[in-house]
Every structure is written in structure tokens, then in C-alpha cells.
Image (cartoon, rainbow, N blue to C red):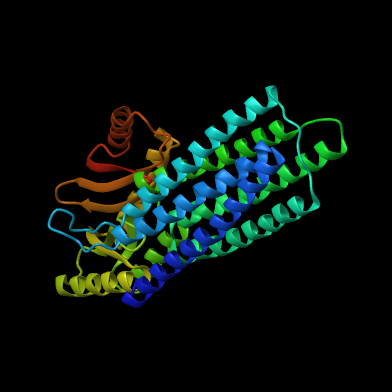
């Protein structure tokens, strides 16, 4: 990501957050006043939820500011992950508001009060619904452009607010025209919407903090870039470490012919590393496997070894870094397994026995790689 792109990203996040603060302040004030005048806990709950959204937007701005701090000696990769922490806090605010509103709504069910009704009140709440839909759309678009977890949480919250406000309006109308008070029930429904949103955003944010599997599209693009730099081939054991939306580092292993020129390989790896950073914004450290599968005997042996391994366990997916040392009667390779394989030591024992039975004159040294990408 260029300096100009980073600056544009910051402007989008802060602009959207400030707009959300202004609109939510107006909506919260209007709803709370209307709720008090009409004695509607559902409308008051909706207003309090809008007030919590103000705090969420403030945290998003503060989180973005702190995340822009320059790297230090103790934090050489910067502070970008603070954005994930701010999104985590926003999620908890949503969850806390949901619990508070649920409590008051349940109390309202057992202690109902008569509701006041006016067309102006309904019209104002409907207007806030459209404002929330507007906020949802612009925050959703901004979150996709900036990859901001906090804006993503805010966009989902805005959509849920629009839905919950719709439920509130429906309950008020039914309570006015029918001899039944649904205000407390509507408040419970609104609260459940908020709780589900909070729980979902917490799980998504935690997933980003813990670390996620690279997207298939990203893996495919990495391998395509590597293929443009012969004699490099493949792209294995890909791991991408995210230090915030603007900083990522990765590791990736490539195959090269065992008889390739060292300088040629070095130049190709340097060029691939540069292109990967330019195209994906990820600084990759590239490792190298020397393979000799240009030899027909090696290719046939590789095929048979993979066949044996798959017969041992259905978790075997693929194999790479295959090299046969004929003089030493030694075979090196990495085997990729899925995460259904839990007993690695048992698999290694059975796999080694099966390989030695099939190829009694050879020894086997191999790594068992989880399916990282």
C-alpha cells in the first residue's frame, strides 16, 4: 500500500466515523425524547443503542490514530493491530448495550405502561430508519475499501439498528390499534438483534487477531507471480502474518531445479519478492527446495510415493520438495495433510513402514505440513 493509499484510507475511516457520530447524536436525542414522551421502552432502547454507536465511532477514530504510530524499538512492526483491538471494544459495547436493553425490556413485559402515539413520532422514527440504512451502505462500502474491522462492525450494527427500529415502529402501531401492549416484547426483539450483532462481530474480530487462513484468491495470485520468474516453481507452505490492515509479512517456499545456477535463482527470488510486495503489499521471505524431478525415474517414484501415502491416510493432500539422492538411496520430500489428521506420530509410523515396504532399498526423510494455504 502506497503512502497516498494509506492517507486516503485514514481519511475515509475518520470521515465516515465523524459522519456517524453526528447522525447518531441526532437520532439518539430524538428517539430518547420521543421514547420518554410516549413511555415506550422500545424507542428509548433504540435511542440508547444509537448513543452507544457514538462511542463506537469515537473508539474507531482513536484506534485509527494510535494504529498510525510509527514503529519503535519494542514494536518494530508497528501498531496496526490496534485497529483490531478497537473493533473488539466496539463489539463489546454493542454486546453490553444489548444486555442492558434486554433487562429493561423484560421488566417492561411484566410491568407494562400505556403508550402515547402520534403520527409525527412514527414519521420521525421511520426517517431514522432510512438514515441508518444510509449509514450501513456508506460504512459497508468504506469497510470494503479500507479493510477496517471497526467500520465493518459499525456497518453491521447500522443494518441491525434499521431492522430493530422497524420492529419498534411495528410494535407501537399494533399497540395503538389493537388492545395489546407489545412494547416490551418489541424491546426484547430489538435487544436480541443487538446481542446477535455483538456476538458475531466479536467472533470475526477475534478471528482476525488470532490469524486466519489466506484467501484462495491471494494464494492463487502468489503462485501466479512466482511462476513468472523461472526457474522458480510452485509456492508452498504459504503463511501470511497480519500486523494490521496496512502491514503484512509472509513466508513461502519455492521449488528450483537442483542443477540451477545459484545467481540465477537468487535474482529470480529477488524479482519475485519485489513483485509480490508491489502487487499484494506483502513482504515475503522466500525459502527454496532443490528438486530433481526432471528425471523420469524421479517423476515416476514421486507419483508412486504419493499413492502409498494416500493409501495410509485420506488426509494426505499433496506432496512437494521431492528429491531423490540416488547415491545415498535417500528420498526427501514434504507431504501436505489436512487438519483432520490429529495423530501425526501414528501417521508417520505407518507411512514410513508402507514406504519402506514399497521401496526397501531407500530411506525416507520427510516433513508433515498442515494445509496452511
Horizontal side of 66 relative to 175 (left or right) equals left
Which is more toward the observer, 352 or 15? 15
What residue do we see at 66% from left, 28% from top? Answer: 108
Which residue appears farthest toward the top when viewing the image?
110
Compared to 261, does 368 lie above or below? above
Q: Quadrant of residue 265?
A: bottom left
With 189 as the anchor, is 237 left or right in this view? Answer: left
Residue 218 image position (x, y, % from top left)? 42, 61
Quick check: 236 left or right of 47?
A: left
Residue situated furthest bottom in the rendering:
4
Q: Which residue is drawn at the image coordinates 33% and 57% (left, top)? A: 244
Residue at 65% of width from left, 51% of height from top? Answer: 162
Q: Position of residue 305 (x, y in %)?
A: 35, 44
Q: In which quadrant is the N terminus drawn?
A: bottom left
Name the image quarter holding residue 188. Answer: top right
Q: In this view, does 58 lie to the left or right of 192?
A: left
Residue 242 image point, x, y percent: 32, 55
Task: Give the total of numbered labels.
Answer: 0
The x and y percentages for residue 70 are 22, 64
User: Which residue is at the far front?
Assistant: 37
Query: Can residue 45 be seen?
Result: yes
Amino acid at each position: 500500500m502506497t503512502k497516498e493509499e494509506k492517507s486516503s484510507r485514514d481519511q475515509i475511516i475518520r470521515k465516515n466515523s465523524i459522519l456517524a457520530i453526528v447522525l447518531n447524536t441526532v437520532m439518539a436525542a430524538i428517539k430518547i425524547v420521543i421514547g420518554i414522551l410516549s413511555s415506550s421502552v422500545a424507542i428509548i432502547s433504540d435511542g440508547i443503542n444509537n448513543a452507544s454507536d457514538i462511542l463506537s465511532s469515537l473508539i474507531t477514530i482513536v484506534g485509527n490514530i494510535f494504529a498510525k504510530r510509527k514503529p519503535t524499538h519494542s514494536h518494530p512492526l508497528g501498531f496496526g493491530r490496534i485497529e483490531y483491538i478497537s473493533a473488539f471494544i466496539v463489539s463489546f459495547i454493542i454486546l453490553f448495550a444489548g444486555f442492558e436493553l434486554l433487562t429493561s425490556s423484560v421488566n417492561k413485559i411484566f410491568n407494562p405502561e400505556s403508550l402515547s402515539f402520534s403520527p409525527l413520532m412514527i414519521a420521525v422514527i421511520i426517517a431514522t430508519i432510512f438514515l441508518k440504512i444510509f449509514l450501513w451502505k456508506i460504512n459497508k462500502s468504506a469497510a470494503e475499501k479500507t479493510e477496517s474491522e471497526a467500520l465493518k462492525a459499525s456497518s453491521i450494527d447500522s443494518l441491525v439498528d434499521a431492522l430493530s427500529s422497524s420492529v419498534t415502529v411495528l410494535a407501537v402501531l399494533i399497540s395503538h390499534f389493537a388492545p395489546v401492549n407489545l412494547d416490551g416484547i418489541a424491546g426484547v426483539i430489538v435487544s436480541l438483534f443487538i446481542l446477535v450483532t455483538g456476538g458475531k462481530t466479536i467472533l470475526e474480530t477475534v478471528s482476525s487477531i488470532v490469524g486466519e487462513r489466506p484467501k484462495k484468491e491471494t494464494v492463487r495470485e502468489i503462485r501466479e507471480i512466482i511462476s513468472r520468474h523461472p526457474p522458480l516453481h510452485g509456492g508452498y507452505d504459504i503463511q501470511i502474518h497480519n500486523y494490521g490492515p496496512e502491514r503484512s509479512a509472509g513466508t513461502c517456499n519455492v521449488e528450483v531445479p537442483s542443477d540451477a545456477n545459484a545467481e540465477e535463482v537468487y535474482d529470480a527470488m529477488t524479482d519475485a519478492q519485489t513483485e509480490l510486495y508491489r502487487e499484494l503489499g506483502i513482504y515475503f521471505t522466500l525459502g527454496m527446495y532443490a528438486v530433481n524431478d526432471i528425471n523420469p525415474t524421479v517423476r515416476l517414484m514421486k507419483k508412486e510415493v504419493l499413492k502409498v501415502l494416500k493409501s495410509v491416510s485420506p488426509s494426505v493432500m499433496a506432496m512437494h520438495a521431492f528429491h531423490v539422492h540416488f547415491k545415498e538411496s535417500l528420498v526427501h520430500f514434504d507431504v501436505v495433510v489436512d487438519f483432520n489428521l490429529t495423530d501425526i506420530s501414528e501417521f508417520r509410523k505407518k507411512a514410513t513402514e508402507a514406504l519402506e515396504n514399497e521401496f526397501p532399498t531407500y530411506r525416507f526423510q520427510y516433513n508433515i505440513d498442515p494445509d496452511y494455504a
